[in-house]
Image (tube, rainbow, N blue to C red):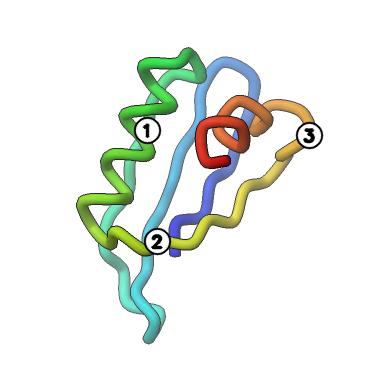
């Protein structure tokens, strides 16, 4: 699972496995290149990654669109 916390101008993501063990974190800009980079990062950790996105209708909307 990747959890994304979005704030204006940047976004951070953290990933844990099914047992809650820390896998890593990633930070990127909210532009298309940054959002795609965040997706690739999570996909490399787990191709079936599930996402929890804070602010999916505001600052997290761009990442929500990339994931659809």
Which residue is at 52% across, 40% downward? 67
Judge the density around disc 1: few (<14), some (14-19), many (≥20) Cα neighbours within 10 Å.
Answer: some
**Secondary structure found at label 1:** strand
Horizontal relation, residue 21 to residue 63: left or right: left
Q: Quadrant of the N terminus?
A: bottom left
Across and down, in percent, residue 15 comes to: 37, 59
Q: Which residue is label 2 attached to?
A: 49
The residue at 52%/32% (across/down) is 66
Q: Which residue is mark 3?
A: 57
| Element under disc 3 | loop
Furthest residue to the left? 44
- Foreground tag (2 vs 1): 2
Cα distance between the residues tagged 3 and 2: 20 Å
Quarter of the image where one finds residue 56? top right
- Single out the residue that lies furthest toward the front: 68
Q: Which mark is residue 27?
A: 1
Considering the numbered disc 2 on the image, is that residue within a helix, a strand or a loop? loop
50 displayed left or right of 68:
left
Tag 2: Cα neighbours inside 10 Å, few (<14), some, or many (≥20)? some
Answer above or below: position of 64 versus 62: below
- Labels 3 & 2 near each other (Cβ < 8 A): no
């Amino acid at each position: 699972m990747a959890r994304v916390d979005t704030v204006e101008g940047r976004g951070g993501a953290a990933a844990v496995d099914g047992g809650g063990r820390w896998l890593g974190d990633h930070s990127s800009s909210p532009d298309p290149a940054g959002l795609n980079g965040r997706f690739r990062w999570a996909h490399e950790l787990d191709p079936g990654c599930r996402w929890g996105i804070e602010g999916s209708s505001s600052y997290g909307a761009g990442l929500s669109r990339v994931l659809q």
